[in-house]
Amino acid sequence: MPERNGASDARGRLVADPFDYRVTKLGGLIVSRGGRPVMTVAGHVAARLVAALQRADDAQVQQLLARASGDYRRGNERS
């Protein structure tokens, strides 16, 4: 059984294909993966997410972005 240490998901997808984000001038957040935009977050949700991302280390950033995008929520997704 793979070790779950919070640094990545159990299958290692966040390490192999990490999320990236960009904060817009208006305070929104564009989440991308593989160079493609996955979603846009705006308003107070974006403000809270940006604050959490600034406090997080690299592994935590990946977890936060995965949760925000809806990926890996249930743990049974397949590629």
Image (cartoon, rainbow, N blue to C red):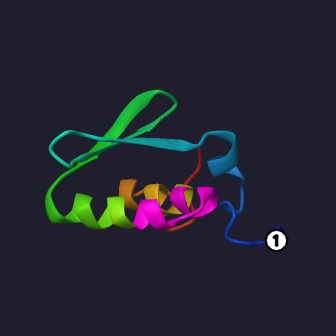
Q: Nearer the viewer, residue 69 or 22?
A: 22
Q: Is residue 25 left or right of residue 70?
A: left
**Quadrant in which residue 24 is drawn:** top left
Q: Secondary structure at mark 1?
A: loop
* Image coordinates for residue 10, horizontal then vertical, percent: 71, 63
**Front in this rendered view, residue 32 or 72:** 32
- The chief SS type of the magenta part is helix
Q: Neighbour class for label 1 at 10 Å: few (<14), some, many (≥20)?
A: few
The residue located at (48%, 41%) in the rendering is: 20
Compared with 70, 22 (above or below) is above
Residue highlighted by disc 1: 3
The residue nearer to you, when weighing 9 against 42, is 42
Q: Is residue 54 magenta?
A: yes
Q: Is residue 9 left or right of residue 21?
A: right
User: From the image, which quarter does the C terminus lie in?
Assistant: top right
**Is 31 included in the stretch rendered in magenta?**
no
Q: Is residue 21 above or below residue 71?
A: above
Q: Position of residue 13 (x, y in %)?
A: 66, 48
Residue 4 is situated, as x and y percent measured from the top left of the image, at 75, 72
